[in-house]
Image (spheres, helix red, strand yellow):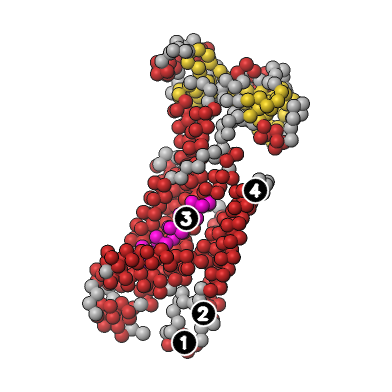
Amino acid sequence: YGIGKAVTAAGMDMVSSVPMPSWQNALLSVVIAVVVTVVAAWFPSRRASRVPPIAAMTGEVTSGEGGLGRRTLVGTIMLVVGIAGIWSGVTLKVSKNMWLLGGGAFLVLIAVTLMSPVIGRPLIWVMGRAYRLLFGETGKLAELNAIRLPRRTAATASALMIGITLVSTLSILGASASTSTEHSVRDSLRGDFVISSLNYGPLPASLFDEVKSTQGVASVHRARTAATTINGARARVIGYPTSDFNKIQAQSMVTGTMGDALGEVIVSQAYADEQKLQVGSTLESVDAATMAPLKLTVTGIFTTPKGGGFGSINANLATVAALGNRDRDSQLSVDAAPGASHQSVQDALDSATSDNPLIVVQNQQEYAKAQSAQIDQMLTTVYALLGLAVVIAVLGIVNTLALSVVERTREIGLLRAVGMKRGQLRLMITLESVIIAVLGAVLGLVMGLGFGVALQHVLVDQGLSILSIPWGRLGIFLAVSVVVGVLAAVVPARRATKLNMLDAISSE
């Protein structure tokens, strides 16, 4: 509910009422939680059962210790196989390339999680050198505490790592989709202005003639949309006069022509390849007036610029009328007269449509930005999910540091006895927390960057023609991780500073 409210406040209405989960969902959540917890506890419980009783009673064994050889070997094998899967998904032109890419990415994610105690050591070393320069012995102790139990440090960082991986991947995909959409609209849009409705509803029937008679307008081209079924599947057919082919959106006819007869349609090359269609092929639809079957004949196959598109199925106005849209224009494309001031023409069009606040007039640049803005708005949901991942990561780091403080009670007492001040102790724990958070963020950003670039290359034919990496947003994610580390250390640091020195030294 909170995430929904935050997203709504950012401009994307997601929550109109308080969500109430069904009892089935609540029960399923409890079952999943119990199963996941039991499975997660199985591995450490097996490790604990193998601890010799004498070693356990003397306190020689600390949680999180143990060799890293086996998990490093398994992680390396998974990493190699995962990278091979990603490479195959990107380079091979096969129908299952998305499965190869997805499977490879999953293996890489698991492999990095297993190997993070080893992979993270160089980063911890670099941060340790910086800590020693900036904070002296306090920084050195923070580094040593972080690498003392590398498995625990890496496991704690994994929650933030997974969240950052997913969000950075989606951020790259969103930025690439937004940039690709903006460029493709600019490249494929034929008219100087586009008139449409804010609520995607039909335009007034009289608007076409009003716009056509507006001063500075050379020509107006109408487009209509009909929702129907094609061969039993839901489909959308875009209709316009035959003479307006390649005048609303950039189009090239590969074979055949666009006809005026009832039931004649043209299809995009991609749709023709997918459905194995050619000129003369027929499609089954429904006449909206009589509900009788309506046979559609393919008379042409067209292409559009990469990333652009005007629907998979186009038809003349007579065919669209039979499919249920007789006179409702969904969009008007306007060409300014040669020599006319575009700003003057847009002002005149705004005046002609001023009676209806739902109608918007946009030039090419405004229309392109409006299309890409829809994608940017969807990213708001992604950032809201990042907030949830951050909360989970904070709780994990808090728990780990709290356990670490308990295990190091005597050590903390000795440090206080030899002169460490409360502020230095608080700083040491905070720096240790920042190491954990930054480790998770850096590993997540590296994987997210790789996954995002790979997915963009695979989805080039689906419209993501331009790779755009939002470096600023990725930098913000890294900065947020530092803040996460600082906040997560507050409670454990306060607990450590409140320990009585003599009681801490005498503790077992």
SS category of the residue bearing label 4: loop
Badge 1: how crowded within 10 Å, few (<14), some, or many (20+)? Answer: few
For the residues labelled 1 and 4, the Cα–Cα distance comes to 54 Å
Which of labels 1 and 3 is toward the front? 3
For the residues labelled 4 and 3, the Cα–Cα distance comes to 23 Å
* Residue 449 falls inside the magenta stretch: yes
Magenta span: chief secondary structure? helix
For the residues labelled 1 and 2, the Cα–Cα distance comes to 11 Å
Q: Earlier in the sequence, mark 1 or mark 3?
A: 1
Q: Which residue is mark 3?
A: 446
Mark sitting on residue 48: 2
Residue 497 relative to residue 105: left or right? left
Pinpoint residue 222: horizontal percent, then vertical percent. 57, 19
User: Residue visible at 55% across and 49% down?
Assistant: 454
Tell me where residue 78 sits by quadrant.
bottom right
Range of magenta residues: 431-451
Three-letter code for the amino acid on which mark 4 is drawn: Leu
Above-or-below relation of 407 to 274: below
